[in-house]
Image (tube, rainbow, N blue to C red):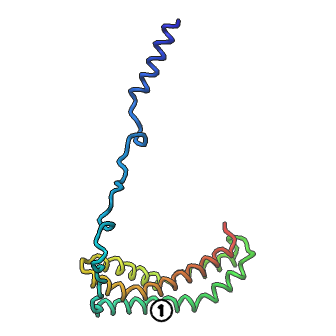
Amino acid sequence: MAGIMLRRLAAFIALFALAPVPAEAQTRAFPSLAKRPIESRDRSTPAPQVVQPAPTDPALAAEVAKLDQQASGGDAAFQQQIAEGRASTAAASGSAPSSEAWVKAQASISALDSARYESVAAMAGLDTLFINRQDNADGARVAADLAAIDPVRTKVLALVDAQNDALDGLRNSLKQP
């Protein structure tokens, strides 16, 4: 009996000895602690010059201005309808879902969402321009293009965020089904 137990124990231990070692337990190559090139450079030499932006691309400036106007138009349409949306959601704030007041409030929220379409589309266009213009080997061109796009992009992003906040506030004031 002791011999059988000893053989089973040996087989059990052999099973674990032959099992593959998990990846975490294998030895890993750690980063070298040797000096990096930047740490051993001659500090008496001047630092690399900052890239001077190229002149603004007129076609890009026109496209950015068009998207800015599109976003402003979308925000104006949204601002015209926001008072109606607030009034209908205030009237439906205590109403049960599917009631007439609740449905009217949902319809006004949908109308507000549609009214801001131009702002959201302009934001998407500016984001696309921002990403596409970064894909250029000429650092001066990239700096000029981003300098033309970024202020308008930041402004439109603030408009869209304010619209999102207003819509979220209206949606949260209604009971959910």
Residue located at (39% from left, 82% from top): 126
Q: Residue furthest front?
A: 44
Place of residue 108 in the rendered image (x, y in percent of width and height, measured from the top left): 60, 82
Q: Would residue 171 appear left or right of 122 to someone viewing this image? A: right
Q: Nearer the viewer, residue 71 or 156?
A: 156
- Total label count? 1
Residue 20: image quadrant is top left
Element carrying mark 1: helix
Q: Give residue 136's position: percent from left, percent from top.
A: 26, 78
Can you say whether 16 is above or below 166 in the image?
A: above
Query: Which corner quadrant of the image does residue 95 belong to?
Result: bottom right
Please state the horizontal and vertical placement of residue 107, each as a whole percent of the image.
60, 79
- Identify the image quadrant of the C terminus: bottom right
Residue at the spot x=55%, y=88% of the render? 78
Place of residue 162 in the rendered image (x, y in percent of width and height, measured from the top left): 56, 83
Mark 1, Cα crowd under 10 Å, few <14 / some 14-19 / many 20+, is some
Asked if residue 93 can be seen in this view, the reply is yes
User: Height in image: 3 above or below 62?
Assistant: above
Q: Residue at x 33, y 66 (%)?
A: 39
Q: Say left or right for 3 vs 36.
A: right
Instruction: Give the residue at the far top of this rendering.
Output: 1
Residue type at numbered disc 1: Gly
Residue at 57% of width from left, 90% of height from top? Answer: 79
Q: Of residues 86 and 144, which is closer to you in this image? A: 144
Quadrant position of residue 51: bottom left
Q: Residue furthest left?
A: 137
Q: Nearer the viewer, residue 99 or 1?
A: 1
Q: Is residue 115 visible?
A: no
Q: Which residue is mark 1?
A: 73
